Image (spheres, rainbow, N blue to C red):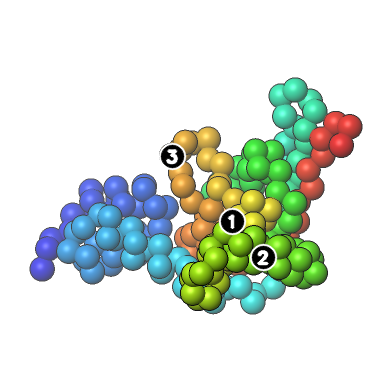
């Protein structure tokens, strides 16, 4: 069995924010492979997020941001189970970065469930018609797959949970907002939800 030293465990903890014991267990499971250990911790975090999703959220914070030109302002509500977590540094960083994300992408909805069902159906019918015209002669399952891909892009453009997370501390961060939320739940162990947001633009 590969020996896992404290320095390696600490390095993984610094990279992921996961508890020391979880980091040690992940490194043991993967034979000391740092990248594979990060994947193990991410999956564990996703599982924790799924288990926590039904727990009641009574605490949280309102985060706000006004752009430097004074013409765009954002308020985001992020909720959690306890006021202790509402003071957590990573929780607060998540809230602040969400504000920057809303400024950057100007999403219209919180998530897929927030989009009017009639609007989704209308868009899907439009995309289906367009796709059938551009892919004439292709099998129906190929057309359907293309439609699903274009609808996925539709949601990614409009829903906050599906846009790219703006992270000033890491410009190469490629995670979606929902990925970051689930990872945060996995690290902290509490249900954390983005409840709502509002973006204002001068004259808008």
Within-10-Å neighbours for mark 2: few <14, some 14–19, many 20+: few
Question: Which of label 3 and label 2 is nearer to you?
Answer: 2
Check disc 1 and report the residue beneath it.
153
Residue 94 at x, y percent in the picture? 59, 48
Q: Earlier in the sequence, mark 3 or mark 2?
A: 2
Find residue 181 and report its image quarter: bottom right
Residue at the image position 69 percent from the left and 38 percent from the top:
103
Question: Taking 14 as reference, is 94 left or right?
Answer: right
Question: Taking 14 as reference, is 65 left or right?
Answer: right
Q: Earlier in the sequence, mark 1 or mark 3?
A: 1
Within-10-Å neighbours for mark 3: few <14, some 14–19, many 20+: few
Residue at the image position 61 percent from the left and 73 percent from the top:
53
Check disc 3 and report the residue beneath it.
172
* Mark 1 to mark 3 CA distance (whole Å): 21 Å
Helix, strand or loop status at disc 3 = loop
- Please tell me the numbered disc located at residue 6: none
Q: Earlier in the sequence, mark 2 or mark 1?
A: 2
Q: Is residue 122 visible?
A: yes
- Please tell me the numbered disc located at residue 129: 2
Residue projecting furthest to the left: 1
Residue at the image position 41 percent from the left and 69 percent from the top:
44
Residue 100 at x, y percent in the picture? 64, 39
């Amino acid at each position: 069995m590969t020996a896992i030293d404290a320095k390696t465990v600490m390095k993984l903890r610094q990279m992921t924010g996961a508890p020391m014991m979880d980091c040690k267990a992940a490194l043991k499971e993967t034979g000391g492979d740092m990248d594979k250990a990060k994947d193990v911790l991410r999956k564990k975090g996703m599982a924790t997020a799924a288990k926590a999703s039904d727990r009641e959220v009574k605490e949280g914070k309102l985060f706000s941001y006004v752009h430097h030109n004074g013409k765009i302002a954002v308020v985001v509500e992020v909720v959690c189970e306890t006021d202790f977590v509402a003071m957590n540094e990573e929780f607060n960083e998540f809230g602040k970065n969400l504000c920057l994300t809303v400024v950057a992408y100007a999403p219209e909805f919180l998530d897929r469930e927030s989009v009017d069902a009639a609007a989704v159906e209308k868009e899907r019918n439009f995309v289906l018609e367009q796709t059938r015209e551009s892919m004439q002669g292709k099998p129906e399952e190929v057309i359907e797959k293309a439609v699903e891909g274009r609808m996925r892009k539709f949601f990614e453009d409009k829903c906050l949970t599906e846009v790219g997370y703006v992270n000033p501390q890491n410009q190469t961060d490629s995670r979606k907002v929902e990925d970051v939320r689930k990872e945060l739940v996995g690290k902290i162990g509490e249900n954390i939800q983005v409840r709502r947001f509002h973006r204002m633009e001068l004259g808008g």
